[in-house]
Image (spheres, rainbow, N blue to C red):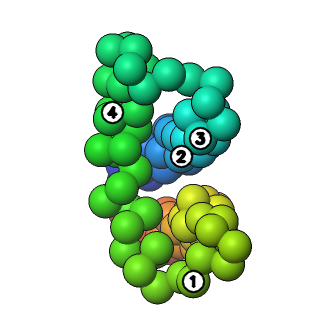
Amino acid sequence: MFVLFVILTRVLEIYCWILLVSCIFVNLYAFGILDSRNQIVWKIGMFLERLTEPVLAPVRRVLPTPGGIDFSPMVVLLVIQYVLQPTLVKLLYLSMQNGG
């Protein structure tokens, strides 16, 4: 059980970093610092979009976008940090108490 906890925790940490990198990438692209005609930039953008959109799209459908600002990455990060990770810790604690 402990190994599963460690793996899930690491996966959540890596996904948080992917979300942050994706946000930075989108802003660099939006301000014209990165050129989408560059093949490497395009591939990185598509890779990040494929990793983040399945999680961000449902959140975007629920949240309003005031002033065109996308708060969905922040909501997902907060849910990971304050809901999922504490739940994992509580489950690990309960499984250790029950001898699992």
- Nearest-to-viewer mark from 1 and 3: 3
Rendered residue at 57%/59% (across/down)? 73
Residue 51 x %, y %? 34, 44
Q: Looking at the rendered structure, which numbered label has been put on residue 30?
A: 3
Q: Rounded to the nearest whole Å, what is the CA distance between mark 3 and mark 2?
A: 16 Å
Residue 29 x %, y %? 56, 34
Q: Looking at the rendered structure, which numbered label has been put on residue 64?
A: 1
Rendered residue at 56%/23% (across/down)? 34
Rendered residue at 31%/59% (across/down)? 54
Q: Say which amino acid is labelled 2.
A: Leu
Between residue 97 and residue 69, name the one nearer to us: 69
Q: Residues within 10 Å of mark 3 (few under 14, many from 20)?
A: few
Question: Mark 2 near mark 4, Cβ–Cβ under 8 Å?
Answer: no
Q: Rounded to the nearest whole Å, what is the CA distance between mark 4 and mark 3?
A: 17 Å
Q: Say which amino acid is labelled 4.
A: Phe
Residue 35 x %, y %? 50, 22
Question: Mark 1 near mark 3, Cβ–Cβ under 8 Å?
Answer: no
Q: Rounded to the nearest whole Å, what is the CA distance between mark 4 and mark 1?
A: 26 Å
Which mark sits nearer the N-terminus, 1 or 3? 3
Find disc 4 in the rendering and name its residue: 47
Between residue 26 and residue 2, name the one nearer to us: 26
Which mark sits nearer the N-terminus, 1 or 2? 2
Which mark sits nearer the N-terminus, 3 or 2? 2
Q: Residues within 10 Å of mark 4 (few under 14, many from 20)?
A: few
Q: Say which amino acid is labelled 3.
A: Ala
